[in-house]
Image (cartoon, rainbow, N blue to C red):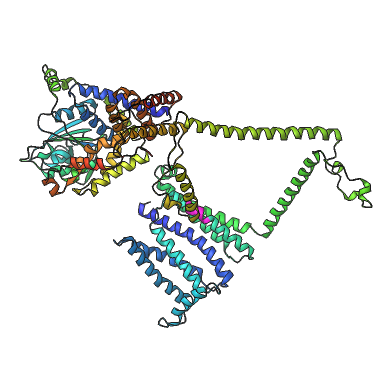
């Protein structure tokens, strides 16, 4: 398949997936609020048109702001046309009454939801999605994200529909179409990755496999659609009830094995109430002798005690493991008070919470990558940073344009007697920093020894 | 980890063998030999530029002889034609059919001596070969043998009767190496070494073609950390934005710098690239691709100086 074709196929599959969940949600709103007065298909027909227009707009060599402006100006025209065609088809084009109806409907939206408002909101969503699609990277991860997003949207729509006695028609068809689009898109994008096994093995028969795959999905969808009916659900419900009954009986039986804390109610207390009304577990469930019951109680107590100890052991093991990792990363590291460190930590925490709250996490974290380093690597990096700070404090800071080895050469020039130590620390740092090489215990201890040796230099200035 | 160490050992063994072998002929110039080795591992073409008599051709021939593969040489002259390089279809009167007679381009290592003496027409016939490892003759496309490495030499001072290489051709060279004059003791060693006979005549090869191809694959597996890759890209991008540069480094240059950095790291026994590798290779790989603005050239602001400025202004990713 040519690259341009496969890209177009991926655009179509993403568009298809989005149209499926959009159709479900917009149909729900249309059915519940507007009693089905609008044609959702007509609204969604705007999507491919909007995509084509946005593709053309994106080709213009203009600043992004201008491109956005042009795109949304075209949207205004498209939205007006949509309202005219769907709601005011009988009125003349030059009749101003339908034009005035749109702002009026928007003003009334909080009190009375008019079809114009749905068209307005729906067209914004469709236009924005098409604009986004133009700039989207059509690769496998993107298709997976679209698929993952579409599924909850569909589930939400179906659940709401089930509460309102099946407002949503063609639910099976929507689900089948969504999965057909999703699976085709995922398979095409996966095959685009030339290292994927599908590409390597089935390269020659790719199109045939794709068509067969889609046909299979549609056929299975139709089959399950016809099989799933109220009787089928009833049978499943009966099986679930029976399983639940068995589980409850088993639980009651286990509960009866536990020693009773209080005395059994005496017949005096029960008064004139018929004692047969009360369930007597001793005879009601699997009648067993008192001696066997005692044995089982004891075994159960042992069982629970074992699990309790096991859980404690696992939790404490995890905590100890975490502590040992922290200690390993801190070992040999000189702690020092940093002015403003607490304030900066608190500010960072507040910023993080605020950013998460406002949903701007991606914006604030742009260009900053965090990764979990092994404790040994983190330890080396901390040690190197301390060495750099130490040298900077003695008048020999690292220039931002200096590499680690250039800086090391500079330090060795100043302190040739400590050349070996500087070489060792820099070498270990470089391999940990750029190669993620985890050093052994011996190397770490030699490194710390070297750092201790350097720290003992009493000169006030290196320069 | 064990596998990667073994792979690194393979490259290190080859590096030692190659350096020792070339060292039997070329005295000193270990930096130039190392760069040639990097080019071999990247399958990139090399332009050796220096004044006459500094050992350009000798280095190229020694490299070719160290690898057990086919070698051809073209001595460029103004009357050299493209068909003299690519080959021709000639009419065989015995068979009464047109037959293809391959030119010297059909070799693993091709030495193009004094490349700037060939006319632009002849020079441009190398464009397809250098980038696509194929040659098209009379509507027929013929793949060149792999590995294909072109080593060209040129003299920067003698400009009469020469044709400067176009930018498209320069961009196809992975790196430009300058030899420089040898030190006094090195020159003395050269005299002693060449006193009896030319050591090149008895030089053995140290690697087979298949082995070289395998090592090329291995060198591509060297790890490049994200920040180092960003630094590499920042360098090439900065050359495009520099005020004194008319034409900056191309995306092909970024790709070549990345490949060469991996190869250099492998040659130096590392499984990962460090910023020093990138910095070290910036001049040989980017230097010949930059074109300074006329006013910068008038101020004697060379591309080397511009690259130096770029490197001295870009922060190196050291502390996270």
Observer-nearest residue: B18 or B230? B230
x, y percentage for residue A138? 41, 53
Observer-nearest residue: A378 or B163? A378
Region of the chain picked out in magenta, as a range: A144-150
Q: Quadrant of residue B286?
A: top left
x, y percentage for residue A263? 87, 42
Task: Assign the magenta stretch its main secondary structure.
Answer: helix
Q: Quadrant of residue B63?
A: top left
- Relative placement, left or right, of A116 versus A62 is right
Can residue A19 be spotted in the picture?
yes
Q: Is residue B177 above or below residue A88?
A: above
Name the residue at 18% across, 24% down: B28
x, y percentage for residue A317? 59, 32
Observer-nearest residue: A383 or A34? A383
Which quadrant of the rendered structure holds the C terminus of chain B? top left
x, y percentage for residue A332? 45, 28
Residue A267 magenta: no
Name the residue at 28% across, 28% down: A414
- Relative placement, left or right, of A217 versus B175 is right
Residue A149 magenta: yes
């Amino acid at each position: 398949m040519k690259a341009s074709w496969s890209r177009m196929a991926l655009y179509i599959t993403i568009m298809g997936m989005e149209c499926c969940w959009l159709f479900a949600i917009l149909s729900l709103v249309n059915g519940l609020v507007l009693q089905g007065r609008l044609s959702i298909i007509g609204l969604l027909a705007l999507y491919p048109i909007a995509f084509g227009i946005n593709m053309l707009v994106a080709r213009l060599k203009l600043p992004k702001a201008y491109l956005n402006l042009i795109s949304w100006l075209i949207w205004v025209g498209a939205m007006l046309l949509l309202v005219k065609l769907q709601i005011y088809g009988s009125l003349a084009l030059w009749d101003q009454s339908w034009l005035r109806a749109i702002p009026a409907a928007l003003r009334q939206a909080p009190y009375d939801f008019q079809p114009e408002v749905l068209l307005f909101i729906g067209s914004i969503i469709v236009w924005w999605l098409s604009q986004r699609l133009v700039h989207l990277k059509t690769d496998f991860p993107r298709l997976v994200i679209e698929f993952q997003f579409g599924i909850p949207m569909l589930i939400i729509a179906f659940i709401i529909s089930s509460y309102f006695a099946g407002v949503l028609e063609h639910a099976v068809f929507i689900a089948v179409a969504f999965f057909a689009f999703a699976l085709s898109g995922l398979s095409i994008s996966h095959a685009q990755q030339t290292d994927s096994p599908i590409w390597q093995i089935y390269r020659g028969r790719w199109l045939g496999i794709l068509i067969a795959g889609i046909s299979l999905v549609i056929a299975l969808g139709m089959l399950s659609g016809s099989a799933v009916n109220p009787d089928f659900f009833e049978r499943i419900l009966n099986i679930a009830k029976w399983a639940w009954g068995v589980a409850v009986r088993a639980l009651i039986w286990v509960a009866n094995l536990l020693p009773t804390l209080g005395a059994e109610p005496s017949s005096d207390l029960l008064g004139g109430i018929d004692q047969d009304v009360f369930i007597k577990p001793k005879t009601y469930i699997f009648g067993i002798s008192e001696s066997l019951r005692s044995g089982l109680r004891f075994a159960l107590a042992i069982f629970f005690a074992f699990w309790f100890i096991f859980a404690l052991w696992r939790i404490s093991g995890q905590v100890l493991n975490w502590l040992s990792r922290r200690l390993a990363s801190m070992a040999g590291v000189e702690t020092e008070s940093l002015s403003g460190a607490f304030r900066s930590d608190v500010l960072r925490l507040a910023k993080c919470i605020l950013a998460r709250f406002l949903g701007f996490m991606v914006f604030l974290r742009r260009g900053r990558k965090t990764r979990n380093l092994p404790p040994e690597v983190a330890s080396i990096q901390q040690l190197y940073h301390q060495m750099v700070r130490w040298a900077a404090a003695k008048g020999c800071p690292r220039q931002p344009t200096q590499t680690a080895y250039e800086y090391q050469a500079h330090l060795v020039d100043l302190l040739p007697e400590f050349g070996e130590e500087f070489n060792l620390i820099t070498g270990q740092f470089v391999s940990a920093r750029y190669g993620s090489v985890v050093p052994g215990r011996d190397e770490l201890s030699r490194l710390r020894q070297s750092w201790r040796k350097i720290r003992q230099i009493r000169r006030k200035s290196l320069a | 980890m064990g596998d990667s160490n073994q792979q690194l050992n393979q490259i290190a063994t080859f590096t030692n063998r190659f350096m020792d072998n070339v060292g039997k002929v070329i005295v000193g110039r270990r930096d130039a030999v190392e760069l040639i080795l990097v080019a071999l591992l990247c399958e990139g073409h090399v332009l050796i530029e220096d004044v006459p008599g500094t050992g350009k051709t000798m280095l190229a021939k020694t490299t070719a002889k160290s690898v057990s593969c086919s070698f051809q040489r073209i001595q460029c002259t103004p009357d050299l034609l493209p068909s003299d390089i690519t080959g021709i279809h000639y009419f065989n009167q015995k068979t009464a059919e047109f037959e293809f007679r391959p030119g010297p381009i059909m070799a693993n290592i091709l030495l193009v001596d004094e490349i700037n003496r060939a006319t632009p027409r002849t020079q441009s016939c190398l464009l397809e070969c250098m980038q696509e490892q194929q040659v098209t003759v009379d509507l027929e496309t013929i793949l060149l043998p792999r590995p294909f490495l072109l080593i060209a030499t040129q003299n920067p001072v003698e400009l009469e009767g020469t044709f400067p290489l176009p930018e498209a051709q320069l961009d196809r060279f992975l790196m430009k190496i300058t030899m420089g004059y040898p030190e006094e003791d090195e020159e003395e060693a050269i005299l002693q070494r060449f006193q009896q006979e030319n050591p090149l005549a008895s030089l053995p090869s140290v690697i087979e073609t298949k082995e070289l191809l395998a090592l090329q694959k291995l060198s591509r597996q060297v790890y490049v950390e994200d920040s180092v890759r960003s630094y590499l890209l920042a360098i090439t991008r900065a050359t495009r934005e520099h005020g004194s540069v008319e034409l900056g480094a191309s995306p092909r240059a970024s790709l070549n710098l990345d490949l060469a950095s991996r190869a250099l790291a492998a040659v130096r026994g590392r499984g990962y690239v460090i910023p020093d590798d990138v910095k070290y290779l910036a001049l040989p790989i980017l230097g010949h691709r930059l074109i300074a603005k006329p006013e910068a050239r008038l101020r004697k602001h060379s591309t080397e100086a511009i690259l130096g400025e770029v490197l001295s202004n870009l922060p190196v990713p050291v502390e996270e």
